[in-house]
Structure formats: C-alpha cells, structure tokens
Amino acid sequence: MKVRVALATEAAPGRPNEDFAAVSADAAVLLDGAGTPAGSESGCSHGVAWFARTLGSSLLAAMTQKHETLPELLAGEIKAVAGLHEDTCDLTHPGSPSATVVMLRRTDDALEWLVLADSGLVLDTGDTAAPMVIRDDREAQVGARYRSAMDALDSGSPEHQAAHRDYVEALRAHRNRDGGFWVAATDPLAADQALTGTVPRESVRTAVLLSDGASRLVDRFHLATWRQALDLLDQEGPEALISRVRAAEHSDPAGARWPRGKTFDDATVVTLSLP
C-alpha cells in the first residue's frame, strides 16, 4: 500500500527548533519539546531539543521493530532515554526536559494512535463529516488558572517574559500528577495516561500530526476550520499552513488579538495521504 508523505517544520524565529517529527513506511511520530524560558533551570545539560530528538527517533524505531502496544513502547523509551542522562543530569528537577507525543502506526487493517499532551492528530475520512480531531487538553485546563497575568501583558515585553516564566514554573507543580496533566519526561507511567485508539485503515483518507505551534491557526487563532486546514494541506502542502500561522503571528506581535505565552512557536506538520 502506497502512502504519500509531506513534512514541514519551522523553528520560531531566533530559537532552535524543539519539535521533532519522523516517518517510516508504517509509522509516524511527532514530539513538541517543552521549552525552558530564559531564567528558568531544567537540571539537564542536554536541552529540550536533544530530548525530543532522542525520544522521537527511538520511538519511531520501536514502532517499526516491536509489537508492544503504543503505551508500552512509549513507557519503555521514556525509561531508556532517562537512562542515557541520569548519571549526568538531575532528573528529579521539576523542569527536566519534557515533550508532547503523537504516535501513529499502521497495521494490516487498522491505524493505531496515541496522543499525550497538546500536540494533535487529525484523521480525515474524506466524506462531508467533520474530521476526527484528537488532542489532550489537560495542560490547557490547568493553565487557565494561571494565564491571566501573562495574557494581560504585551507579548515580547520584559514583563511578559517574566510572567511567562512564572506561568511555566507554576505548571510544573501539576506536571505528571493526578489531577494535573501528563507529558513524556522521566516517568514511564506517564504513558499510561495517554489518549489512545484505533480506526479502520480503509476509513481514513488523510492523517495529520501537528505540534501546537501549527494547530494554533485553527484552535487558537480561529482563522480556519479543521476542514479548511485539511483542504489547504491537500492543495498546497504543510508549508502553506505554517506560512498562514506565521502571517497571523506577525500581524499580532503584542498578543492583543490572541494573548499567548509565545509570540512565535515552533511549527511542525506531517501529513500522510492514504489511497
């Protein structure tokens, strides 16, 4: 069975790209590393980009070589990556590098998926019905308690930067805890908290994996519906969607229209077209 793949990723201006995405014949993975704001510590000398790249590449290999469930694979690779730097870094630090995870694996008759934290998966059945959108919004629910001070300030100002740092550090108290939200970091048990499911393979025309920096065109800026975003991806490719995101961000540099922690964010899109 042939699959047409398109992948685009673009770092936020002036920053290293902390997203990671990769695709094989029967699997795809996308991770969005949780950046450490200036002035905050992480306890890790390797950095978020290293963590997302290392975990993401090991996940893709595991999906293509092993037969465990997706949560079992994620738990195993979280533990394996932790073992790579537990002797050099403080993995008990609340700011230890973490990432969202989207995993997609094709079997003989199904597509298996896993979503952990706020990157997204969109499955298009190709009919007139709205596409299936899978996203874990627990971090957003927790974050709503702490956003008001940050959102009231102009993005990019020193005051906003300080408020964003306070916001991120407040969220750390809820990370990978019951009643909070779950991400891939150092605790393999986080994998058990992921959203998972399967769909018949023949029912899906297109599968799209997006970091939240790319999905913000729809779910934060509300400049397109998911159907319109899918049409754009089909007609012009993932670069076009990212370009629309960048245009919106540039049109609102102070966050007056769309208050947000990051004026610009890394944006990554993977589309898999299934005949």
Image (cartoon, grey):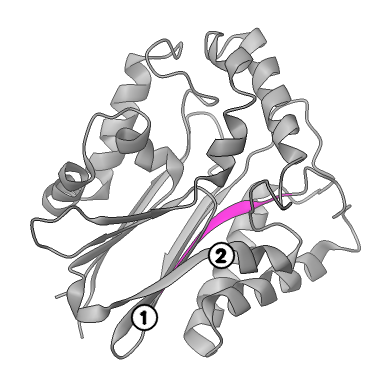
Residue 99 on the magenta segment:
yes
Frontmost residue, 84 versus 181: 181
Q: Quadrant of residue 7?
A: bottom left
Q: What stretch of residues is rendered in magenta?
A: 97-104
- Amino acid marked by disc 1: Asp
Can residue 122 be seen at all in this image of the molecule?
yes
Q: Is residue 198 above or below residue 187?
A: below
Determine the residue positioned at 21% across, 39% down.
Answer: 225
Q: Is residue 258 above or below residue 26?
A: above
Instruction: From the viewer's perspective, tell me whether residue 260 is left or right of residue 132.
Output: right
Dominant SS in magenta:
strand
Task: Give the numbered dot on residue 26.
Answer: 1
Can residue 113 be seen at all in this image of the molecule?
no
Q: Is residue 266 above or below residue 38?
A: below
Q: Tag 1: Cα neighbours inside 10 Å, few (<14), some, or many (≥20)?
A: some
Determine the residue positioned at 62% across, 27% down.
Answer: 145
- Amino acid marked by disc 2: Gly
Q: Position of residue 163 (x, y in %)?
A: 67, 17
**For numbered disc 1, what is the local secondary structure?**
loop
Residue 43 on the magenta segment:
no
Instruction: From the viewer's perspective, tell me whether residue 179 is left or right of residue 132.
Output: right
Q: Position of residue 164 (x, y in %)?
A: 65, 22
Q: Position of residue 45 (x, y in %)?
A: 81, 48
Q: Which residue is mark 2?
A: 56
Where's the C terminus, which quadrant?
bottom left
Q: Earlier in the sequence, mark 1 or mark 2?
A: 1
